[in-house]
Image (spheres, rainbow, N blue to C red):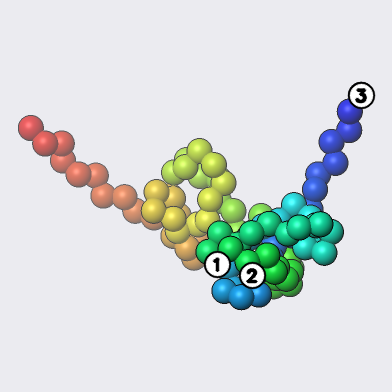
């Protein structure tokens, strides 16, 4: 029987261009760190603000999208402050 341990992603930033990327391991645990998609350097640091942030508390599960998304997104049924959005029905073109 296999046990799947959920990994803790590490939110990191490039030290050169400040691009944000989520790595599977801590940057110090790589023999050769992944390249930055913007500047192609291999120097990452852990972004402590993103690591402390609870992204699941901000997730919305309404019928606007089939996946978890942020409230106030384009097709979300709620505004960013949590109130229900009013959609205007457009008349069908003849």
x and y percentages locating residue 93 in the rendered image: 11, 36
Q: Reading the chain from its start, which is encountered first: label 1 or label 3?
A: 3
Circle 2 crowding by C-alpha within 10 Å: few under 14, some 14–19, many from 20? many
Q: Is label 3 in a helix, a strand or a loop? A: loop
Instruction: Return the residue at label 1.
Output: 39
Instruction: Return the residue at label 3.
Output: 1
Circles 1 and 3, Cβ within 8 Å, touching? The answer is no
Q: Residue at x 56, y 59 (%)?
A: 37
The answer to whether 79 is drawn above or below residue 60 in the figure is below
Total count of labels: 3
What label does residue 78 carry, if any?
none
Question: Label 1 vs label 3: CA separation?
Answer: 43 Å
Task: Say which of 11 and 72 sits in front.
Answer: 11
Horizontal relation, residue 86 to residue 26: left or right: left
x and y percentages locating residue 22 in the rendered image: 67, 57
Q: Reading the chain from its start, which is encountered first: label 1 or label 2?
A: 2
Question: Label 3 vs label 2: CA separation?
Answer: 39 Å
Circle 1 crowding by C-alpha within 10 Å: few under 14, some 14–19, many from 20? few
Q: Residue at x 59, y 53 (%)?
A: 59
Horizontal relation, residue 72 to residue 14: left or right: left
x and y percentages locating residue 85 in the rendered image: 39, 55
Q: Residue at x 39, y 49 (%)?
A: 75
Q: Reading the chain from its start, which is encountered first: label 3 or label 2?
A: 3
Q: Is label 2 in a helix, a strand or a loop? A: strand
Q: Quadrant of the N terminus?
A: top right
Quadrant in the picture for residue 17:
bottom right
Q: Nearer the viewer, mark 1 or mark 2?
A: 1
Instruction: Return the residue at label 2.
Output: 14
């Amino acid at each position: 029987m296999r046990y799947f341990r959920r990994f803790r992603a590490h939110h990191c930033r490039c030290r050169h261009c400040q691009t944000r990327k989520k790595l599977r391991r801590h940057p110090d645990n790589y023999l050769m760190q992944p390249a930055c998609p913007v500047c192609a350097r291999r120097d990452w640091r852990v972004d402590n603000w993103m690591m402390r942030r609870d992204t699941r508390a901000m997730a919305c599960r309404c019928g606007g999208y089939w996946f978890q998304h942020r409230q106030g997104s384009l097709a979300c049924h709620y505004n960013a402050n949590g109130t229900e959005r009013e959609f205007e029905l457009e008349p069908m073109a003849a």
